[in-house]
Amino acid sequence: MAFPHLQQPSSLLADSINKPFAQRCQDLVKVIEDFPAKELHSIFPLLVESIFGSLDGVLVGWNLRCLQGRVNPVEYSIVMEFLDPGGPMMKLVYKLQAEDYKFDFPVSYLPGPVKASIQEHILPDSPLYHNKVQFPPTGGLGLNLALNPFEYYIFFFALSLITQKPLPVSLRIRTSDCAYFTLVDRYLSWFLPTEGSVPPPLSSSPGGTSPSPAPRTPAMPFASYGLHHTSLLKRHISHQTSVNADPTSQEIWRSETLLQVFVEMWLHHYSLEMYQKMQSPHAKESFTPSEEHVLVVRLLLKHLHAFANSLKPEQVSPSAHSHATSPLEEFKRAAVPRFVQQKLYLFLQHCFGHWPLDASFRAVLEMWLSYLQPWRYASEKQVQSSDSQPRCVSEKWAPFVQENLLVYTKLFVGFLNRALRTDLVSPKNALMVFRVAKVFAQPNLAEMIQKGEQLFLEPELVIPHRQHRLFTAPTVTGSFLSPWPPAVTDASFKVKSHVYSLEGQDCKYTPMFGPEVRTLVLRLAQLITQAKQTARSISDQCVESPSGRSFLSWLGFSPTDPNSCYPANDLDEMGQDSIRKTDEYLEKALEYLRQIFRLSEAQLAQFTLALGTIQDENGKKQLPDCIVGEDGLILTPLGRYQIINGLRRFEIEYQGDSELQPIRSYENASLVRALFRLSSAINRRFAGQMVALCSRDDFLGSFCRYHLIEPALANRHLLSPVGRRQAVNQARGPRLSLRFLGSYRTLLSFLLAFVMGSLLCIRPLPCTLLLVLGYLLYAMAMTLLTERGKLHQP
C-alpha cells in the first residue's frame, strides 16, 4: 500500500538528524507506526547504526555507554522507553521479522576465532552461524552473514560494547548507572525470565499475527567445528542437515538467539587452540577486554544463574526429562553448560594471565566469584544462621562444582600466582585476597572441590579418544534442543570430559589440594604475615612523625632518612582507617586459608617469628634477602619481593663527588652553581699552596686537612662492587668547598644570627666578626678531636 501523503521514511530519518533528541525519537515512533515493513526495511540498518554506532567505531550513535539517568534524566528516560524490549524499536524489529527480511552483516567484525573459522570455510560450533554465511557476488569483497531483523539488532547491540572506543578515564562513569548496562539487564529479564514464560512478540498492528522466525534455508555447507576440516567446495549442499527440526523450538528462539549472541560477542574471543598458543611468553594478545566489558559479562552470568536456578524442584529431578517438559525449561538446564562454560573459562584464563597487576582486577575477580557461586542466585534462599557464620553449601551443588572443576581449581592457582606478585599492603589488593579466601572457605565447598579432583584422578582402563566432544560439540542444527545428548550418569567420566574438553587429553593437571599448590598457599601466608607487619610499621611511623617535620626537612634541619620510609601506596592517601582495614582483611584471609587447606597454627606462628621481624642494633630493618656472588650481593626472588613491597631496602647514599651531586630541594640552585664556579676558580689558583699546607705535620696542617680534605671514600659503606672498583681511582687532593653557603639552612642561620644581634644592639660588622671567631673556635676543637681519634685507631 502506498502512502502518497506521507514523506518517505528515509527522508524523514535524514530530516530528523538535526532536530532535538526528544523530537527525533517522536518522529521515529511515528515512522515505525505509520509505514509498512516494505518501506521500513531499507532504513532499518541505518537506524540501527545511528543508535548503536558503526562497527568500525567511527560513529558513536547515541552513546549509550555514557548516558546516565542522574546526569541526563530526560534523554535517559526517552532512550529507555524507545529501546525497551516492549518499546517502538522492538516493534519495528518484529514488523520486519514477520516479512522474512534479511540483512547482511560483515564477517570481518565478528570475534577473532569465529571470523578465522568462517574465512577458512569451517563452521563455528555455535548454531547461531549455521546456514547464514553468504559468499559475495562476483567481484565482491568479504563474507557476510544473512541475519533476520532480530538477530541483526542484537548483533549490533552486543558488539557496540566491543567496537566503540574505551571510555576516557577522566569521565568516571559508573557502568551500572549507564543506559547500556540497564538495557542489558532489561533484555535478559525479558527474554530469559526467571518467572513465567517469554512474553510473545508484540504485534505492530491490531489483530496482527505474532511474527515467528522464517525457515532458515541452507546457504553453504560447512565442516563441523573441532572435527576434520572439510572445504566448502568439497561438500555438496544436499549434505546440509535440516535446520527446522523441532517446531516447539519456535517458542524460545528469541531467548536462544539473545544468549548465543551475547556469549559469542562478549566471550568468544579466544579459541582453545588460541588459548594454548597464548601460554607462550612470546605470544601477542589478540583481544583485551575492558573493565566495563567485564562488568557487563558479570551481569550476564548472574542473570544466567538466576535463570537456570528458577527451575522448580520437580523439574530438576531426572524423572522430569520427559516430552511434557517445555522448551524453556530444557533451555534453562542447558544454557550454562551448553553455551557458556567453555568460552567463559577461556575468557577468564586470558584475564587472569594478562590483566594488569592493579586494583582494576577486582572486576575480573568478582565476575569469577559470581560464576563460582550459583547458590547465591537460587530461587530458594537459604536462611542465614543467627550466629552470622557462613552458610553451608548444599550437596546439591556438587554436580556443578564437578562439571566446572577447572574454573575452581586452575583459576584459583592462577589467582595465587597473581597475589604473590602484588603489594598486599595495599587495602585494595588485601581485599581481593580476602574475598577469594572467604568464598572458598564456605563450609563444604572445599570438600566438594576435593571430591571432584578425586573423581578426575581416578584411574581408568580406557579413555575414549576425544570422547568429550559428545558434551561440547553441537550438531549442525538451528536449535540446541534436538541434538541434546542423553545425560551421562558416571560422575568420574563427567569430570574427565570437562577437563579434557578445555585442556586437551594430554593436559597436566595440578591438584588444588596437592603439595605444589599447598607450597604456594604457604608462600602467600608468609607474604600476608609480612604485609601485616609492614602495615603496622607504616602506622607506627605515621603516629611517631611530628607534624612540623616536613617544614623542617624543607629547611634542611631535619633531612629525611631515605631508609626510614616506605614506597608510596594507597595507605598514604587514605590514612589510619585503611591501615586498619588492611590488617583486618589480611587477618581474616589468613584464617580462611588455614581453614581451606587445614594449615596448623604452628605453621602460621613460625611466619610471625621468622619473617622480617628481627631488627639490627640501629633499629632498622635488615637488608633484603641476598646471596653472595662473585661481584657482591645478588637478590633472591624473596629479596626482590621485599624491595617491591617496601618490606626491606638497601641503604642508598650518594657515592660520587660531593660537589657534583644533584641540587637538593633545600638548596638554592642559582647560588649553588655560582659558589661552585667560585670554589673551582680558587682551587685552580691555589692548588699548590693547599697541598703544601695539608702536608704539614703541625696543628696548622691538621686544621687545613679538616677543612680542605673530604672523608676518604674507603670509610663509606660502598654496597656495589662496581662502586668499589671506581673508588680506587677517585683519590682527590685538597680543595675548598663553598656549597654549604647555598643551603637554605645556612642562610636562615645567618639571618637569625643577625636578627638576634640587632636585638642585642650589635651592628652587622661586629656580628660577622663574632660569627667568624665562634666558628674558628669550633673548628679548632673539632680538629683536635679528629686528630685524637686518629691516634686511637688500631
Image (cartoon, rainbow, N blue to C red):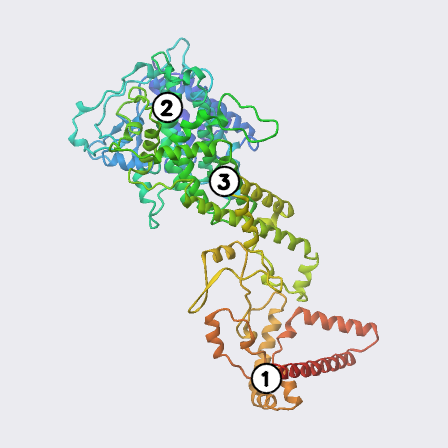
What's the CA distance linking mark 1 and mark 2?
90 Å
Labels 3 and 2: the sequence-earlier one: 2
The residue identified by callout 1 is 682
Query: From mark 3 to mark 1, how far is it between C-alphas?
Result: 74 Å
Q: Amino acid at mark 1?
A: Ile
Residue occupying the point 47% across, 37% down? 292
- Nearest to N terminus: mark 3 or mark 1: 3
Task: Quickly name the residue at label 3.
Answer: 598
Count up the numbered dots. Answer: 3
Spot occupied by residue 72 in the image (x, y as percentages of width and height): 55, 31
Which element type, helix, strand or loop, lies under badge 2?
helix
> Residue tagged by mark 2?
334
Type of residue at label 2?
Ala
Q: Dot 1 lies on which element?
A: helix
Q: Quadrant of the C terminus?
A: bottom right
From the image, state whether disc 3 or disc 1 is nearer to you.
Answer: 3
